[in-house]
Structures are given as structure tokens and as C-alpha cells.
């Protein structure tokens, strides 16, 4: 088992470290202008019901295209934005854009009324004392029902300041926004917190789904998580489903929702709408 690196530990100076620091500064500077230069874009990955193969919703995933640096993956720039605090502004942009798009789709009847759009929320956002209010204000501004939005938080995102996070999540849940635990199984947290949180969706991390069809251990692990999820009355989403074998195993476990390349990668808005049109006909 890999032991996660502790934050703020001393590291000896190396040229690689220098290069990493340099890159961080560059990315930080570039990120500062990303919003106003309209370099950010949302992609949308469909979530499909295993039983009826309908698309009940999608997850908004951020994409950044810089004119010189090219396409920078979120796994690279999100951690930088989290470190620098830029994630607050970026996260607000994601929330606003998501609501704006969803409102358009609903008005043009391109999605059903029960279509849910999920956004990823970083811990810094979650521990702002007005985060829930910001979400509700944005929904109201676009005349969207709270039930059309889902918030995805990771276990580590919750652990930063559990008390404040819990307060915000309770406000969101009370208003009707559904809360999903993202990348479930990869964090530090104990199971005890699950019953404290107003969670309704559990997303099983794709590292467990990945080898399920070749590893009995992984298969058992997913089965155990599925059973637990069912006992808690959570809706379970399997992340990163790429092939038929994985899908069949999940069918046996009664998994509700599937997200992964097997059905669709994250899509541009235009491609998502085409996808929905095709799948719903
Ligand atoms: P995540 O929220 O767990 O999103 C799922 C990631 O898995 C996405 O990567 C998606 O493209 C990828 N994925 C989906 N299906 C498959 C599959 O079948 N196979 C494989 N190999 N990958 C699959 P992406 O878009 O690169 O995003 C990476 C992470 O960046 C996200 O993980 C999330 O933690 C973060 N992120 C993305 N957008 C945002 C955002 O708007 N705000 C915040 N705070 N974080 C974001
Ligand atoms: Mg997510
Ligand atoms: Mg995930
Ligand atoms: Mg992830």
C-alpha cells in the first residue's frame, strides 16, 4: 500500500523540485487570466441507468486550453488552483456556467425535468461559510429547482474542516440538492462519518472498477461497497466503466448508475445534446 505523502513536510532541494515550483508559478499566473480570456470550458459526462440505459444526468468536468501551454488536464491545474485559492473563483464559474447551461437545456426541452447536473466541489469551497447560500442564490438566479443540481465532494474534501463542511452540506441537502461522495474508497475517512452526512449518492472510484473483471479481490471489494451503499439507501454510481465485463458484474450487484467510457467519455455541450437526442429516441 502506498502511504500518501504528508503535506508540508520538508523536502531537499532538487532541480526537479525547482522545475515543479516554476511550473506552479507559471500555471498560477496563467490561471489568473483563464476565466476572463475564456480559456475554460465545461465538458459533460453522461450518467446512465444500468437497467433502462437512460441518461438521467451528467457530471460537469472542467477543461482548460491555454494558447501557449496547450490543453492542461484538471488533475494538473485543479491541485494548483486548490493550493493558491484560485479554486474559489473557478468553482464559482463552474457553478454559474453549469446552471446557465442547464437552464438553457431545460427551456429548450433538450433534457427531461428530472435531469441532474453534478458539479465537483473542492474543500476550500465547501468550507466557506456562505457556500450553500451561493449555490442556492445561483439556482434561484437561473430559476432552477435545487433537485436539478448535485454536489460531488471527496472524502478528503470533507476532512479539511468537518464541522463547517457538514453545516454547508446540511443546508444544501435540506434545500433539496443531492450530495455525492466522489472517488469513494480512496480517502482516509472512516465509515462512521457516512451516517453523519446528508449524503444520497456514493460514487465508487474507478481504481476499484478497473480490474474488477480480472481480480477477484477487487470484485469482492466492489460487492462489499455496493452492499453497504444499499444498506445506507444510497444511490450507487460506478465510475470509469470501460467494458462489457465490468458492466455485467455491476449488473449482478444491482448498481444503479454507470459513468464511464463504455457509454461515453466527457463530451462538449454540443456532443452531449446529440448524445441525449440519440439515446432518448
Ligand atoms: P472526478 O470528479 O472523479 O471525475 C472523473 C474523472 O474520470 C474525469 O477525469 C473523467 O474524464 C474520468 N473518467 C470518466 N470515465 C472514465 C473511464 O471510463 N476511464 C477512465 N480512464 N477515466 C474516466 P477528468 O475530467 O480528467 O477530471 C479529473 C478530476 O479533476 C476529477 O475527478 C475532479 O476531481 C477534478 N475536476 C474536474 N473538474 C472539476 C471542477 O470543476 N472542480 C473541481 N473542484 N474539480 C474538478
Ligand atoms: Mg466527480
Ligand atoms: Mg470521481
Ligand atoms: Mg477523481
Image (cartoon, rainbow, N blue to C red):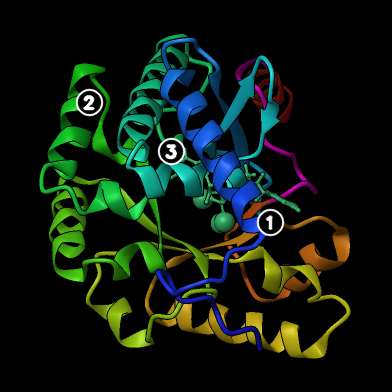
Residue 86 in percent (x, y) is at: 36, 36
- Say which of 142 and 247 sits in front: 142
Q: CA distance from mark 3 to mark 2?
A: 15 Å
- Which quadrant, please, contains the C terminus? top right
Q: Main secondary structure of the magenta part?
A: loop
Q: Can you identify the residue that label 2 sits on?
A: 138
Residue 23 in percent (x, y) is at: 60, 40
- Residue for point 20% across, 49% down: 172
10 versus 227 height, above or below: above
Name the secondary structure under disc 2.
helix
- Closer to viewer: mark 3 or mark 2: 2
Sooner in the amino-acid sequence: mark 3 or mark 2: 3
Q: Can you identify the residue that label 1 sits on?
A: 16
Q: Can you identify the residue that label 3 sits on?
A: 116
Marks 3/2 in contact by CB < 8 Å: the verdict is no
Whether 53 is among the magenta residues is no
Whether 261 is among the magenta residues is yes
Q: Is residue 256 left or right of residue 117?
A: right
- Say which of 207 and 6 sits in front: 6
Name the secondary structure under disc 1.
helix
Residue 276 falls in image quadrant: top right
The stretch of residues the image draws in magenta is 260-270
Amino acid at each position: 500500500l502506498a502511504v500518501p505523502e504528508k503535506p508540508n513536510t520538508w523536502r531537499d532541494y532538487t532541480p526537479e523540485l525547482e522545475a515543479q515550483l516554476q511550473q506552479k508559478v507559471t500555471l498560477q499566473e496563467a490561471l489568473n487570466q483563464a476565466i476572463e480570456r475564456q480559456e475554460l470550458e465545461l465538458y459533460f459526462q453522461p450518467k446512465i441507468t444500468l437497467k433502462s440505459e437512460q441518461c438521467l444526468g451528467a457530471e460537469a468536468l472542467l477543461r482548460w486550453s491555454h494558447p501557449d501551454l496547450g490543453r492542461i488536464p484538471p488533475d494538473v491545474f485543479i491541485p494548483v488552483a486548490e493550493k493558491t485559492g484560485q479554486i474559489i473563483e473557478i468553482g464559482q464559474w463552474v457553478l454559474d456556467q453549469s446552471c446557465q447551461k442547464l437552464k438553457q437545456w431545460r427551456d429548450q426541452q433538450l433534457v427531461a425535468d428530472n435531469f441532474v447536473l453534478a458539479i465537483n466541489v473542492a474543500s476550500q469551497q465547501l468550507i466557506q461559510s456562505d457556500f450553500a447560500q451561493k449555490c442556492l442564490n445561483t439556482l434561484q438566479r437561473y430559476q432552477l429547482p435545487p433537485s436539478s443540481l448535485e454536489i460531488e465532494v471527496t472524502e478528503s474534501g470533507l476532512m479539511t474542516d468537518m464541522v463547517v463542511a457538514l453545516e454547508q452540506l446540511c443546508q444544501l441537502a435540506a434545500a433539496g440538492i443531492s450530495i455525492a461522495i466522489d472517488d469513494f474508497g480512496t480517502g482516509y475517512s472512516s465509515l462512521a462519518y457516512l451516517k453523519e452526512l446528508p449524503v444520497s449518492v456514493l460514487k465508487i472510484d474507478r481504481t476499484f472498477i478497473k480490474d474488477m473483471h480480472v481480480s477477484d479481490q477487487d470484485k469482492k471489494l466492489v460487492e462489499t461497497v455496493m452492499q453497504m451503499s444499499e444498506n445506507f439507501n444510497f444511490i450507487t454510481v460506478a465510475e470509469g466503466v470501460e467494458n462489457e465485463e465490468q458492466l455485467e458484474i455491476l449488473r449482478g450487484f444491482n448498481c444503479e448508475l454507470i459513468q464511464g467510457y463504455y457509454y461515453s467519455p466527457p463530451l462538449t455541450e454540443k456532443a452531449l445534446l446529440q448524445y441525449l437526442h440519440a439515446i432518448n429516441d
